[in-house]
Image (cartoon, grey):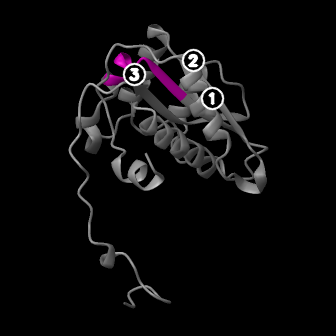
């Protein structure tokens, strides 16, 4: 699979087979995440691999508790059935005020790498700058120390569904030259 087909083919998957993911596959994904760009090369990442059903259940409760009304059709219940959930965390001091950006870049590498390895995944936020309660509850649930923030969660598993291809707007509608609006 080449990079173009990985980027174009990756879809959000919320239904997984009960098949476990081997540790070396998870290690490969986290190694890819380490190569993501980070502010001032701070490499601020920590990755928590969650396989325990009780821990996944706590994450489901937290995510559902803070699920905005407009996203009510996307409850986190499916996370319970994911063989693995990776929680991407970042260290404040090594993030240089770019916690979210650093974590999202590492998360993108995991999402793309997972697809290349035949795994399904979906991006989930674990942090809101203006609503710290979500991250605080996740921090307590996973014993994350102060100064390290959980930013994203990535449920992973072998897909048990095939999402429809993504419909994309026209490229010409999002490209401008020199100034916004100038075609």
Of callouts 2 and 1, the N-terminal one: 2
**Label 1 sits on residue:** 47
Do the CB atoms of the residues marked 3 and 1 lie less than 8 Å apart? no
The residue beneath circle 2 is: 23
Q: Against 165, is 75 above or below?
A: above
Q: Which x, y percent locates residue 112?
A: 47, 43
Does residue 24 appear to the left or right of 72 in the view shown?
A: right
Mark 3 vs mark 2, CA separation in Å: 23 Å
Q: Residue at x 31, y 30 (%)?
A: 14
Q: Is residue 118 above or below residue 80?
A: below
Instruction: Name which of mark 3 and mark 1 comes first in the sequence.
Output: 1
Cα gap from disc 2 to disc 1, whole angstroms = 14 Å
Residue 85 counted in the magenta span? yes
Residue drawn at x 43%, y 27% as measured from the top left = 156
Magenta region, residue range: 78-86
> Which residue is rendered at x = 42% and y = 56% of the image?
4
Q: Quadrant of residue 162?
A: top left
SS assignment at label 2:
helix
Q: Position of residue 177 (x, y in %)?
A: 45, 88
Q: Residues within 10 Å of mark 2 (few under 14, many from 20)?
A: few
Report which residue position mark 3 lands on. 60
């Amino acid at each position: 699979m080449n990079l173009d087909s990985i980027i174009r083919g990756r879809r959000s998957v919320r239904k997984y087979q009960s098949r476990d993911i081997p540790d070396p596959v998870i290690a490969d994904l986290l190694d890819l995440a380490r190569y993501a760009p980070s502010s001032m090369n701070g490499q601020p990442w920590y990755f928590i691999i969650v396989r325990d059903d009780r821990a996944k259940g706590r994450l489901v409760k937290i995510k559902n508790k803070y699920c905005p009304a407009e996203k009510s059709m996307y409850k986190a219940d499916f996370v319970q059935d994911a063989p693995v959930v990776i929680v991407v965390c970042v260290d404040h001091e090594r993030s240089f005020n770019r916690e979210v950006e650093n974590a999202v870049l590492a998360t993108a590498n995991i999402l793309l790498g997972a697809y290349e390895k035949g795994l399904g995944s979906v991006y989930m936020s674990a942090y809101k700058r203006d609503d710290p309660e979500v991250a605080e509850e996740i921090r307590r649930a996973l014993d994350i120390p102060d100064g390290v923030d959980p930013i994203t969660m990535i449920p992973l598993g072998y897909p048990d569904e095939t999402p429809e291809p993504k419909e994309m707007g026209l490229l010409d509608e999002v490209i401008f030259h020199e100034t916004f609006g100038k075609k």
